[in-house]
Amino acid sequence: MSGPLYIPVLPTRPHAAGACRRLWPDVRAAIRPLWNLPPLPGAAPEALATLVGKYVDPVSAVSRHGGWIDAPFGEDTQTTGLADALSVYCELGRFRPVTGPERTEAQQAAAVETARRCARGLGVRVRVTGEWDDGLGEGVRNLLARTGPEMPVDLLLDMGAVLEDRPDAGKEARRALDGLMPLVVWRSAALLGGGFPRVTADMLEEGWCEGSRAEWRMWHEVRATGSAYAPLLGYGDYGVQPPSALAQAPAPGRKGGPPWGVLRYTIGNSYLMFKTLTRGPDRIAVNRSAARRIVELPEFRGAGAGQGEEWLSDCAHGPLTTSEGVGGPTEWLRAGNLQHMTYVVRSLPGG
């Protein structure tokens, strides 16, 4: 069993595609993203091909090493249309389709058929957002009966949000893996979790806050168990957004938003978050100050560590007379994911 070094769970959004595009080549070669289409509420089946293209074309262009493509929020009436639209990127691109035990029979059948036609294998995404349920194991067993022994299958054990309020996440992940690993000879298996908290205004009252990388701790906890699968278990996370961000439906033309934002930086066991402003007379000064607080951290890895650090350094040292380079929400997310993904790859064994 072998697999990619790092699986970032990402939305098919411009900031995530932009981050992958700017990664250094060796870092990009080490990752295989699990891309997620947003909800497309009420979209007619005949419109799905166009909508899917809008979101998947950019991420396909930056995924030359492959990955997975999932539509976890697809409506029942959209199953066939989504499967047909996504199959193009599996057949002509390098993506693998995804299904899971909680999906409808129609979605499972469509994903298996796409995987069979494309001959790249199937991603089995098993969500465990609380305690492990043996019924999920039975659901996976039934799903695998559809694939047949000849199809390569990848286990994507998705623990969802893994924050400090889930101290037993490591134990539940072990229970899940103990139940799932014997079901089949998996081509690869990865443990995924989202550890970045949903940032609120009150968290940034003092201009910054710190969050624990609980999902990183969970992965190490499972790896330290001594299980036969532990040394081969891949790592994945949701980058610098909480898992709930994936479920945000598109809102074309939406204007406004909060007057503040966040610059994010990842260090050993923590996420650091610094308040920025999206508007107002103090925006330039506050945003450059936030970037400067990051580059002055003892843990800052230097402007040469990656494209994310380079952007932060340029922002920190830019003039107060121009807003060029201070960014906005899209740039802050892109820079955050750039530094995070590069740091994760460098931190993993073999990275």
Image: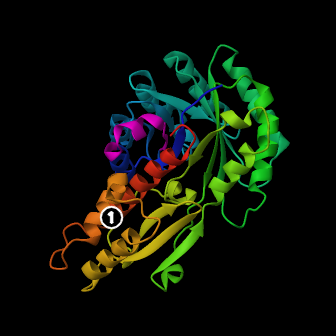
The residue under the point 43% across, 49% down is 342
The colour scheme applied to this rendered structure is rainbow
The residue under the point 43% across, 74% down is 274
Image coordinates of residue 40 in percent, x first then y, are 46, 49
Q: Which residues are drawn in magenta? A: 21-36
Image coordinates of residue 171 in percent, x first then y, are 80, 51
Indicate yes or no whether the magenta region holds residue 79: no
Q: Secondary structure at mark 1?
A: helix
Image coordinates of residue 302 in percent, x first then y, are 36, 60
Kindly indicate the quadrant of the structure image that contains residue 50. top left
Q: Residue furthest front?
A: 298
Q: Nearer the viewer, residue 155 or 97?
A: 155
Q: Which amino acid is tagged 1?
A: Leu
Image coordinates of residue 168 in percent, x first then y, are 79, 58
Kindly indicate the quadrant of the structure image that contains residue 156. top right
Q: Nearer the viewer, residue 65 or 226?
A: 226
- Give above or below for 118 relative to 77: above
Would you call the spot at circle 1 few (<14 residues within 10 Å), some (14-19), or many (20 or more)? many
- Disc 1 target residue: 312
Indicate yes or no whether the magenta region holds residue 27: yes
174 relative to 344 in the view: left or right:
right
Kindly indicate the quadrant of the structure image that contains residue 275. bottom left
Q: Residue furthest left?
A: 321
Q: Nearer the viewer, residue 236 or 265?
A: 265
